[in-house]
Image (cartoon, helix red, strand yellow):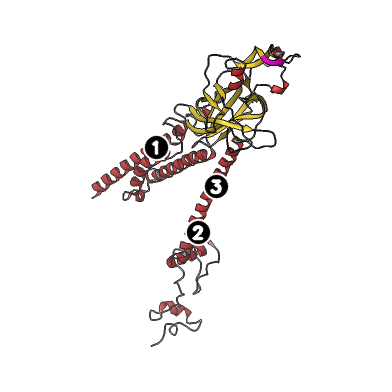
Amino acid sequence: MATPYEKAPHTASAYNNTFSNTDIEIQSPKAESSYFDEKDDAHDRNVPSFGRKTPTRKYSARWWKRTWDGAVRIGTWPRLIYCCIGFVLMILWLGVMLIFVGNEVKYEQQNARDTIQRHRTGDSNGESISGSILLKGTLVNFDAGKRSLSVSWSGLYKQDNYSTIVDLADPLEVNSTTYPDGIGIYRDVTATPYEYNYTYPELLENGTETTQTSKSWMYRVDNDTLKPVGVIGRHQWDSFDTEISFTQKYSKNVWSQPMLGYPFDKWQGQIVFVANDIWWATTDNVTNGDVFPLAGIQLADSTLNWRISYTFNNTCPSPSALDYEHGEAWPAYCYLDIHFDAVRPPLVIFAAVTAVVVNWTCTLFIFILTSEAIIMRRGYMLEGTDILSMCFTALFALPTIRSLLPGAPDYGAIIDLCGVLPCTLIVALCTVCVAVAKLNKRKREGKTD
């Protein structure tokens, strides 16, 4: 039996008879098509075929697609790739957290900076002590609801400019000192110049000892009936606690208002301290007298989801520069004025902004899907319960993200009005629209049947 190729005409004269003869068959050999699919080469259907299809150009989009499909069938490289991507994302997240932790460490170091000013005082033996007394504040808690900061205060001491700061009244520290009668700390008062009679012993020429009285000046607490809020300097563990009220730092700025401007709210607080040497006040017989300047403060520890910083102003002059016989020229007030600032740390701001971005991203995605299914009439998207289930899930999941925010205030902050409430409303409307569209589709299908 002759092959199809033998039945084909071999001469030009018989060309016209080729298509009129029904017994003659013409067949071309088929090219290999196992690697090429009809869908990928649809754009080449109008191009004449000469028994072989044009191979895909390497590194083109079609080449990458086919290569990836082949790799997926094997499964080794795709698994390795998504494991590497997950590992890289985990490393990036840990890196970001370490940056925030390092930032917190620098902030704590800044609060523990060395600020010193010397002062005059004395011990129970009447010997002069040169050194600086500081207050060390340990941050306990910041209650945004009560708008107050809890701080526990203790004493620090620095003997001279070449020694380090140590705990006051530390028996194991050679550079520390102890005040047997203690140092009285008064809150939210000032000290004013006060003239008093200073009595001192004097030895006469005949060898007898007598006492002399002269006028002298000192600073005294302006309320002589006030009791100190704490006494430090007798023991290393002496301390006292304070509650400091906070208010809005910047007015006419809604983004910095306490609670409302979360996480960009800024707070401020203030406290005033006056310290006096109890032994000297008793010796001079002046109640709440012999006030000396506190050299400064240091803050220790930190509060969760808050960053507390401070500045202070010591209005007391240096005792060595005072003329104790002419107190009329002394400054009118002596006190340590401390201002506190409270802001959210970068970690809280990062978490809040990320939550808003995720909320809006999910909301826009659901809104686009709903619009495509209903407005663009893509009925296949309404098949099953996928899109409706997604809307219902997002309706309850998106508001839950808000409860995960660190240090979030009660509902009603700007972040709720900008990133939670509108997203929830949009998703709720999308859910209703999808449900109505599915019911109408089922109604039309029922009429058709």
The answer to whether residue 414 is seen in the rendering is: yes
Q: Which disc number belongs to residue 98? A: 3
Q: Nearer the viewer, residue 203 or 163?
A: 203
Mark 1: secondary structure: helix
Q: Nearer the viewer, residue 431 or 74?
A: 74
Of pointers 2 and 1, the one earlier in the residue sequence:
2
**Residue 58 to residue 245: above or below:** below
The answer to whether residue 276 is seen in the rendering is: no
Residue matched to label 1:
424
- Part of the protein shown in magenta: 199-203
Q: Are marks 2 and 1 in contact (CB under 8 Å)?
A: no
Q: Determine the CA span between mark 3 and mark 2.
A: 21 Å
**Residue 295 to residue 1: above or below:** above
Q: From the viewer's perspective, is 405 left or right of 293?
A: left
Taking the spot 51% from the left edge, 49% from the top edge, the residue there is 93
Crowding near the residue tagged with mark 2, few <14, some 14–19, many ≥20 C-alpha atoms within 10 Å: few
Write down the quadrant of residue 333 in the picture: top right
Disc number lying in front (2 or 1): 2
Mark 3: secondary structure: helix
Residue 434: x and y, percent?
Answer: 34, 43
Residue type, numbered disc 2: Cys
Residue 208: x and y, percent?
Answer: 71, 14
Residue matched to label 2:
84
